[in-house]
Structures are given as structure tokens and as C-alpha cells.
Amino acid sequence: MRSDSRLPLLIFLFTGFFPLHQACAQVQASLTMSKREYISHEPVVATVSLTNNAGRDLVIHTDERTNLNWLDFEIKNSRGTALSPLAAMNFGPVRIPAGRSIAKSVDLTGAFRVTDPGRFHCKAVIRLPGGGGNFVTNTTYFSVTVGRQVYSQRIGDPSLNNVREYRLSIHNSARKSSLYVHLVDVGTGRNLQAFRMGEVISSKPPKATVDRANNLHVLFLAAPNLYGHGTVTPTGTYLGTKYYKPSQGGKPALATFSNGDVMISGGIFYDPKAEAQNRGRLRKLSERPRMTFR
């Protein structure tokens, strides 16, 4: 009887693909980005969601035999070139109860060079321990841009090698403009912090100054007749934004006193959250049924 030479190949294919098929049946995975557009050096956060369909609790961890992480990312730029990791990413074990889902968020800026302007596509690789196979998530896309710089100010003592620079930039997207703050170590050129301060009307340039403690104060037009006052410390801590509206005495402005303190002069303090709560109370009162007296 003539043997079929294709049989060993077919057996190899089926046995080779079974662990991957089994892994996909056990765990469903998806990848999302915190947003589609990022400013250079802003945290690029990817979230991997895993759903356990194995019918039992699963523990996913680094395989001791290979020392490969159970979670990895593959990122390519617009030219299709894969980005090499800048640093190792180590993830501890995770337990997924049967029928439940978990989500793992990772800042990719610490492990990959995603600070240069460009368009990138990313997918995650999940490896199940004990020969359970590995599989990839969906591919998601994001872009990194450089905003238009509108202000810079250096602080610190050069003799102590602690000079830093505040930088303000405006990023214009299709729907809105946003104001960003960067804090840069001048000696190394390393970006220490980058974050979004809020929406801004870009036709009116923001005003900025530094107080005696080297805190950065920024006054910007957040909406028509609504000004935002944001404060950032020399360590890069964002102290939040307070809002003001024009008053009869004039529009809000940054005022520097003789002792170096910086405060807002003019304008009336405005709390958007309090106003939203008041509107909610009024709406509930208006929704009450009318009472008829006889």
C-alpha cells in the first residue's frame, strides 16, 4: 500500500497550530489607546483587555523556561520599521477569574521611542505559560505631533546643575486647540514632564510668568469670557487650574507683587463643577409634577 507523504506534514500543521487555537479559545484580548493624537513626550498609554473564557481561573505569568514576558508590544513607524525596546518591560503575574475580564494599562514612552513626530501602529502579544501558546491583539494606530511653542522660561541655578526649562505649546486638532506644558532638564535635554493643561482659544496667546518659588503660572483663554489659571511646580507637579470670568473691573490678569508672589487680579472666580450641580438641581425641581389645590 502506498503511503501518503503529505500525512506527516498535515499532522505537524495540526499539532503545531493547536496550542495557538486553544489559547485564543481560552482568552480574548483587545488593545486600545488612551487617544489617537499625542504631543511629543506626553504619556502614550495602551490598554490591553483580557477576558477569560476557559471555564476556570487563569494565572498568566512570565514563563520560567524562556524568561519571556507574558505581555509584549510590537510597534512600527509609518515606514514599517519596528521600534526596538529602549528598556525591558517586566510585568508581574495576573489572575483572571473564570468569565471575568481585566485591563492592563502601560505607558509606552518608557520602553519605546514614541516621542518623535510621526504615525505609529501597535499591537500586543500575549504569551500563555506552560506551552499554552501566544497570540496577538488587534492593531491600533496613533500619531505623535509637536505643538507650536508660545513660551519658554529657564529656572534653577547653573552652578548646581539643576537648570530646568518650562515650555508652553499649543496643539491644534480638527475640533479643538489644547495647551500643553513641558518641563525639560536643560543639562541632559531630557523631558521630565509633559501634560495637557486644557482647551485654549489659540487666537489669544496665553500669558505666563514665574513666581519667587519658581512655580509657573499660566493664564489662558479657555472659552469665550472664561479664563484658566494653571500652576506647575519646578518638580513638574501640576497644581490644577482655576477659572475666572471678567468683572466690571476688567478682565483677569497675572499680577506679580514686590515679594515675588503671583496672583490673579481682576475677574470673578468661577467654578464650572458648582454651576453644573446647580443646573442639575434646577432641572430636578422643574421636573417635579405640578400640584393642584382644590
Image: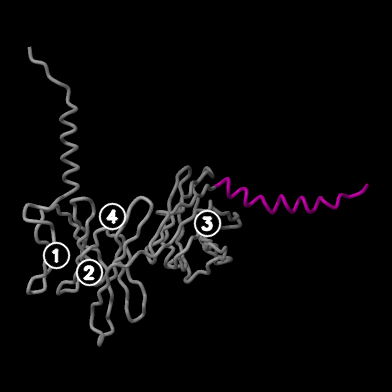
Q: Residues within 10 Å of mark 4 (few under 14, many from 20)?
A: some
Instruction: Identify the mark nearer the N-term, 1 or 3.
Output: 3
**Alpha-carbon span between mark 1 and mark 3:** 46 Å
**Alpha-carbon span between mark 1 and mark 4:** 19 Å
Q: Residues within 10 Å of mark 3 (few under 14, many from 20)?
A: many
| Residue contact at pointers 2 and 4, CB within 8 angstroms | no
Reading the image, the residue beneath label 1 is: 254
The C terminus sits in image quarter: top left
Residue 162 as seen in the image, left or right of residue 39: left
Q: Main secondary structure of the magenta part?
A: helix
Reading the image, the residue beneath label 4 is: 199
Describe the colour scheme in one phrase. one colour
Reading the image, the residue beneath label 3 is: 123
The amino acid type found where label 4 is placed reads: Glu
The amino acid type found where label 1 is placed reads: Leu
The amino acid type found where label 3 is placed reads: Lys
Instruction: Identify the mark nearer the N-term, 2 or 4.
Output: 4
Q: Nearer the viewer, mark 3 or mark 4?
A: 4
Image location of residue 20, percent across then percent down: 62, 52
Instruction: Identify the mark nearer the N-term, 1 or 4.
Output: 4
Reading the image, the residue beneath label 2 is: 233
The stretch of residues the image draws in magenta is 1-26
Image location of residue 105, percent across then percent down: 41, 56
Q: Nearer the viewer, mark 2 or mark 4?
A: 4
Instruction: Identify the mark nearer the N-term, 2 or 3.
Output: 3
Instruction: Identify the mark nearer the N-term, 2 or 1.
Output: 2
